[in-house]
Amino acid sequence: MDLSFRPDIRTVLSIDELHSLVAWIPPGPRTIEYRDSLIVSLLAELALRRHEVGRLAISSFGFVAGRPWVSVLGKGFGGKGPKRRTIPVPIPLYRRLVDHWEAFNLQPEAPAVWNFKHHSNPISGNQVGFIVPTRCHQLLGFRVRSHMIRHSVATAWIHLGVDIRTVQLLLGHADIGVTARYLHSSSDLLVDAVDSLQGGHYTRSQTALFPEFIRSAKGGAS
């Protein structure tokens, strides 16, 4: 029996790790760090794809019944349509975006997130793909790709009780089967599911009672 196996605990981020990403608010709305924090929050709060961030204009944001929403342009192929969807925006995130736009006196037609050297040019998906792992390494201690954040948010929504149809609409999937492939269970949730039939008698804290070689195989702390 191979006792060296351990589940991949980095398939998705935990809810606490997502909160850590959202909580990063650098001082000064005119700085690159502040801009990057907005990119991370757009991914970690709205589950946007990296190219969707680059397609956002200030005019993409509007209000419905006093609540900010954003119109997102998606891919629209391979089961990932429709091309455009509308998502409610957390009010604190919207306020941070407005602070950033006002700091540069930007007009509605300007990109919501842009190449810092050229305010008229939107940031590209490839740039987002470079920024996110770097910033996540600073915040979490390990690199995270932008699409892993999208998977993590979808999983967190499901675990918090959001029905899969709503998650499908938020992610912009035409096929709910595509949404289902985005859902992951963390190692802790897998352990809880298996142990649930034991009447709750087994807990993770009891791994300290296991011999060292078993704790190593389970990924427990020494």
Image: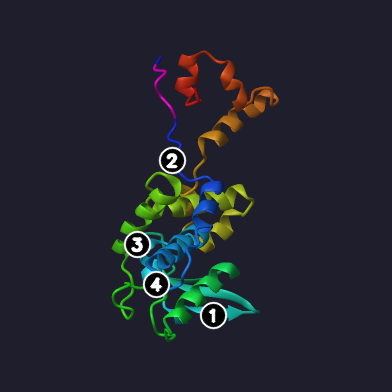
Q: Is residue 165 placed above or below 104 in the rendered structure? A: above
Q: Secondary structure at mark 2?
A: loop
115 sits left or right of 188 in the view:
left
Q: Which residues are magenta?
A: 2-6
Q: Quadrant of the N terminus?
A: top left
Query: In x, y percent, where is residue 84?
Result: 45, 72
Name the amino acid, label 3.
Answer: Val
Query: In whole angstroms, how far apart are the C-alphas of marks 1 and 4?
Result: 16 Å
Determine the secondary structure under disc 3: helix
First in residue order: circle 2 vs circle 4: 2
* Residue 8 visible in the snapshot: yes
Position of residue 64 measured from the top left corner of the image (x, y, whole percent): 61, 79
For the residue labelled by badge 1, is the local secondary structure a helix, a strand or a loop? strand
Q: Amino acid at mark 4?
A: Val
Mark 1 touches mark 4? (CB < 8 Å): no
Residue linked to disc 1 = 62
Q: Label 4 belongs to which residue?
A: 113
Relative image position of residue 191 (x, y in whole percent): 56, 30
Gap between marks 3 and 1 measured at Cα:
24 Å
Residue 4 counted in the magenta span: yes
Front residue of 141 and 52: 141
Residue occupied by mark 3: 128
Q: Which residue does the image show at 35% across and 73% down from the upper left?
A: 114
Residue drawn at x 51%, y 48% as measured from the top left: 17
Q: Which residue is mark 2?
A: 10
Q: Residues within 10 Å of mark 4 (few under 14, many from 20)?
A: many
Q: Are marks 2 and 1 in contact (CB under 8 Å)?
A: no
- The amino acid on which the numbered mark 2 sits, given as a three-letter code, is Arg
- Indicate which disc, 2 or 1, sits on the residue closer to the N terminus: 2
